[in-house]
Image (tube, rainbow, N blue to C red):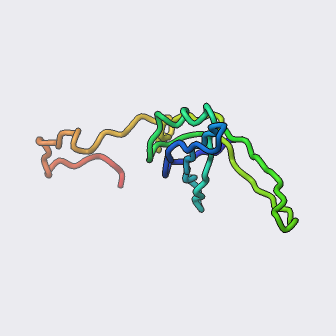
Amino acid sequence: MEVQGRIKMVGETQTFGSNGFRKREVVVTTEEQYPQHIMVEFVQDKTELLNNFKEGQQVKININLRGREWVNPQGETKYFNSIQGWRIEALQPAAASGDMPPVPPTEAFEPMSDLNEDDHDDLPF
């Protein structure tokens, strides 16, 4: 699975427990009719993948959905989901006009200087 969007926030690497579990979070805002702020966590050696990314960049992140079950001290079962990233790559902004070359601005054209208002064209309308 993957998620695409613009990076809203890149967190610092956090370390937990005596075994040194590492986690780093990134929030990506999707670019659709109703933008979503998706938090993706990178763990262990994957935390370093975020080192070269910053806020505002458009990215594609390959993800896995993770789920776990936990029984609290009262005996109630709870379920938790997480989105875990395993690859991230920068996207180039899409060209608004597709494959067409850019249109030069009107200032690039010289105005006609030899226009004579007495000359009539031969257009039928």
List x then y, in percent, for residue 112.
Answer: 16, 42
Q: Which image quarter holds the N terminus? A: top right
The answer to whether one can see residue 91 in this image is no
Q: Nearer the viewer, residue 31 or 25?
A: 25
List x then y, in percent, for residue 59.
Answer: 54, 40
Q: Which image quarter holds the C terminus? A: bottom left
Q: Nearer the viewer, residue 91 or 94?
A: 91
Residue at point 21%, 43% (across, down): 107
Q: Nearer the viewer, residue 23 or 118?
A: 23
How many marks on residues? 0
Q: Nearer the viewer, residue 20 or 28?
A: 20
Residue at point 44%, 46% (across, down): 55
Q: Is residue 117 left or right of residue 42?
A: left
In the current view of this chain or complex, which residue is farthest to the bottom? 74
The answer to whether one can see residue 53 in this image is yes
* In the image, residue 65 above or below residue 100: below
Residue at point 46%, 34% (across, down): 52
* In the image, residue 103 above or below residue 79: above
Residue at point 47%, 38% (across, down): 53
